Amino acid sequence: MKRRITMNAPETPTHPTGAALLFDVLTDLGVEVIFGHTGGAVIPLHVELNKRMRRGEPCPRFIMCRQEGGAGHAAEGYARVSGRVGVALATSGPGSTNLTTPIADAYKDSIPTLFITGQVPSRAIGTDAFQEVDTVGLTRHISKHNYLVKDVRDLEWVLREAYALAIHGRPGPVVVDICKDVQLAQVTETNPPRRRHREPVPFDAAQADAILAALATAQRPVIKAGGGIIHAEAAAALCRFAERFDVPVTTTFNALGAVPFADPHNLGMPGMHGTIPANYALRDADLILTLGGRFDDRVAVSGFAKGKRIAQVDIDPSEIDKTVPTDLHLVAGLDAFLDYALGTGRTASHPDWMVLIQQWRTQMPMPYLPMPNLKPQAVVEAISELTGGNATLVTGVGQHQMWAAQYYRFQRPRQWVSSGGLGTMGFGLPAAIGAWFADPTRPVVLIDGDGSFQMNIQELGTVVAQQIPLKIFVLNNNYLGMVRQWEDMMDDGHHYETCLSRNVDCDRDCTEMDEDCRRQIPNLLGLKHVYPRLKTLRITTAAELHEGIALALADAHPMVVDCWVDKAENVLPMVRPGHGLDQMIES
């Protein structure tokens, strides 16, 4: 006779687990979306999240990406568009190592992000356990701050402090590595928060007044506005400031959209591939006022500060005099500085300078010669026209990125999503996913290159699974075009591993696309057979351009548009490495 064994149902814990506490805190902080991938060291977190979803309790929505790096870039895209903290979750070991590129990307561009990773049980740390990686050590130099949580009593204050650090002051990525046993442990008490971070620097009105006086007395002043303008939500104040002081504004790569394209004070992007008016103005200026931006080596080119006064306002004191010595500076939030400046009642006028600026602005963007074949500049201009300049525009990294920055007519802040300081190929597709979740009310357009697009092409699975109506325009020139352009300058046109259709039997060194080359490249139209509900379209001539783009934009489904552009087209203008603004190549 079989003996029946009855088991009592486990009692409901009287105290929450670390996993439950984590979602309590994130929900309290207002986190609505988490991008991530699952794995052994974060299973307790996913179990808790699933329980809450089944019970209908408030909790963040989890977006399952196809690779952890994609999840990290999606969190960046979300943060860039929303202005809120983007959150990514991954397991230990390869999960956390796959996050290092988006962490570094967010660090270089000061993007408010929170990266939560699982870790092996605390007792196993240092034993070379399965999927153990020193995540804190690995991310120490590419994050604003990081934590290893080995005691559940520290979890709440760490999460709250990490979130605050990510968004306040100069934003940036913060990493919280949580041991698996901490996720499972019950919380019976919590440790008090630790106050370890520096206090903000008091606003110095005298320094602000000195900068404003210099701006008023200069004959040819220029504002170089950086990404800090976007982070400080100070774009509208910047436009009023430029009008009040009658001064032109260059918006660096990360500040595009801070000043509308048609604004008479707007000069566009400066630097290596900057606009003609931006670079001419910086070349001839007698005062450059940098607001919330680094003196990046692609902007502060050779001789950048020669014969000029340099003024700088930045919330991060470490940026002052870091690469370019300043004559005047102020450590302050840009919102505080601009509010103060507008509140003083000061004005200025530079009529002769602004007349010259308007003459230069006729070359923004730089004119190009239309052709029957498809010019990449024309693709971007058509997208800009058909979206009214109001789409959320995302790019990968390469030539297409520079054409997008030059030829799209930006209207507002937070509509430009691209990898600046790190230059991460493969950034575009996952970042566009995050951008859509941040603001699904606006069309999201991804302009990518065929090389960059293929680096995270797996995230098409996420796009289709989440039914995101993303429009992807691949400027397909069958090259790693930016490297090819540099090879033309530096190696007399000899190309090495930059042609994407080249195979072991190919001994040609060409820049012309023939049918044999076309047979060697991935058939992007075939992606519709790989991912259900994904549509594809190909555009090969200028005559097909407007109709094809309009068709794609009007469709409710995600779509990949394969644009066969000139293989040998270069990004111009260009300031070559080691050269000055007066040596800019225009043709």
Image (spheres, grey):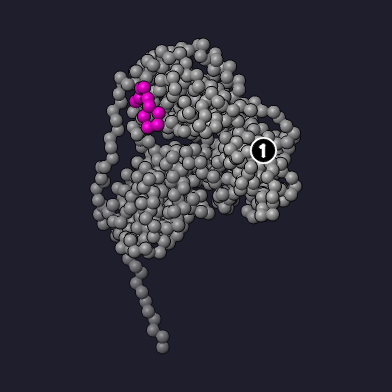
Residue 448: quarter of image: top right
* Residue located 55% across and 15% down the image: 356
* Residue located 25% across and 51% down the image: 191
Report x, y in % for residue 407: 60, 30
Q: Nearer the viewer, residue 503 or 139?
A: 503
Residue projecting furthest to the bottom: 1
The answer to whether any part of residue 386 appears in the image is no
Report x, y in % for residue 208: 34, 21
391 inside magenta stretch: no
The residue type indicated by label 1 comes to Ala
Q: Nearer the viewer, residue 153 or 338?
A: 338
327 inside magenta stretch: yes
Kindly identify which residue carries mark 1: 568
* Residue located 55% across and 36% down the image: 392
For the N terminus, which image quadrant? bottom left
The answer to whether any part of residue 69 appears in the image is yes
Q: Is residue 467 above or below residue 245?
A: below
For the C terminus, which image quadrant? top right
Q: Is residue 534 above or below residue 405?
A: below
What is the magenta range? 321-330
Residue projecting furthest to the front: 492
